[in-house]
Image (cartoon, rainbow, N blue to C red):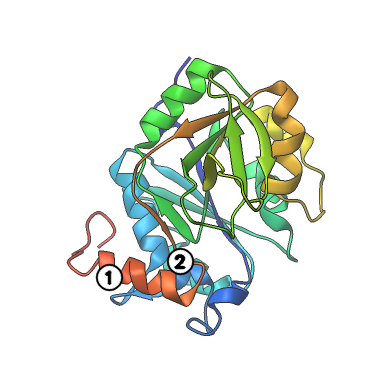
């Protein structure tokens, strides 16, 4: 059965230290990096709320008070719940720490320092059709060398996660947006550092991980240069449901 975006929880990973972005953003979490006086996290929430998502769990860590101060207690037109990790737990560890707050099956996870402009309803439809344990949004690999690469077969099933090798042309890279069936939470250890990319997804390959390939615009603010690129792309943005 397919659930629409309105019935799916969105977990946003906002707890990273953001060391590469520190020269440009030193006083706040990288998800709160300002673009035209608005935090990047606003743009993420705007995108998913416009497409119908109504329940959002923000996983905070480093300087998480900045995030709680802005978003905690929001109830309309969407609900925000805060899950604060007591120590750096990694991407999967943060999701497991928030497990008691996640109500939907499946649920969606997005990195707090990137945005791919996919309609989450389409991603959920794809996930339901494939009936796998996880679905990853994928973008064309291009010239990126600082990301993990993903190989899929003719059925869109992920067969390998690799690093870029000299002389090879990788297919796709992970765009930082996932759908997981709820059972995945049982596979993540409690109270431990754990990574979606390095620990969870490779372990799930035998159970079915699928790649949703998209040509949608993808933005990553992980470095000062990419933050500036995103700001340039939004020079005429005037806000919307979060204004």
- Of the numbered discs 2 and 1, the one sitting upstream in the chain is 2
Visible residue check, residue 104: no
Task: Please identify the quarter of the rendering in which residue 100 is found.
Answer: top right
> CB atoms at circles 2 and 1 under 8 Å apart?
no
Please provide percent x and percent y for residue 40: 40, 66
| Residue displayed at 54% across by 45% down | 173
The quarter of the picture where the C terminus appears is: bottom left
Q: Which residue is mark 2?
A: 221
Please provide percent x and percent y for residue 47: 33, 49
Query: Could you tell me which secondary element the residue under label 1 belongs to?
Result: helix
Foreground: 194 or 78? 194
Q: Residues within 10 Å of mark 1 (few under 14, many from 20)?
A: few
Q: CA distance from mark 2 to mark 1?
A: 12 Å
Task: Please identify the quarter of the rendering in which residue 37 is found.
Answer: bottom left
Q: Residues within 10 Å of mark 2 (few under 14, many from 20)?
A: many
Residue 160 appears left or right of 123:
right
Foreground: 70 or 236? 236
Task: Say how many tags the image has.
Answer: 2
Asked if residue 94 is positioned above or below residue 205 in the image, the reply reads below
Query: Could you tell me which secondary element the residue under label 2 belongs to?
Result: loop
| Residue displayed at 27% across by 64% down | 233
Label annotation for residue 232: 1
Foreground: 69 or 131? 131
Please provide percent x and percent y for residue 234: 25, 65
């Amino acid at each position: 059965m397919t659930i629409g975006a309105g019935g799916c929880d969105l977990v946003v990973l906002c707890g990273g230290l953001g060391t590469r972005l520190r020269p440009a953003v030193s006083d706040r979490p990288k998800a709160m990096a300002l673009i035209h006086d608005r935090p990047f996290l606003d743009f993420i929430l705007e995108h998913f709320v416009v497409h119908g998502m109504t329940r959002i769990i923000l996983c905070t860590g480093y300087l998480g008070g900045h995030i709680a101060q802005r978003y905690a207690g929001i109830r309309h037109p969407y609900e925000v719940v805060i899950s604060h990790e007591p120590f750096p737990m990694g991407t999967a560890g943060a999701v497991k720490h928030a497990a008691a707050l996640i109500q939907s099956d499946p649920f969606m996870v997005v990195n707090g320092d990137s945005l791919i402009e996919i309609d989450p309803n389409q991603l959920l439809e794809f996930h339901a059709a494939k009936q796998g344990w996880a679905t990853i949004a994928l973008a064309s690999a291009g010239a990126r060398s600082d990301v993990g690469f993903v190989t899929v077969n003719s059925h869109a099933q992920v067969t390998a996660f690799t690093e870029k090798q000299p002389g090879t042309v990788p297919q796709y890279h992970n765009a930082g947006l996932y759908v997981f069936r709820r059972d995945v939470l049982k596979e993540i250890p409690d109270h431990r550092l754990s990574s979606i990319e390095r620990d969870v997804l490779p372990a799930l390959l035998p159970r079915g991980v699928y790649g949703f390939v998209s040509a949608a615009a993808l933005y990553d603010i992980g470095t000062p240069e990419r933050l500036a690129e995103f700001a340039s792309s939004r020079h005429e943005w005037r806000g919307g449901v979060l204004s």
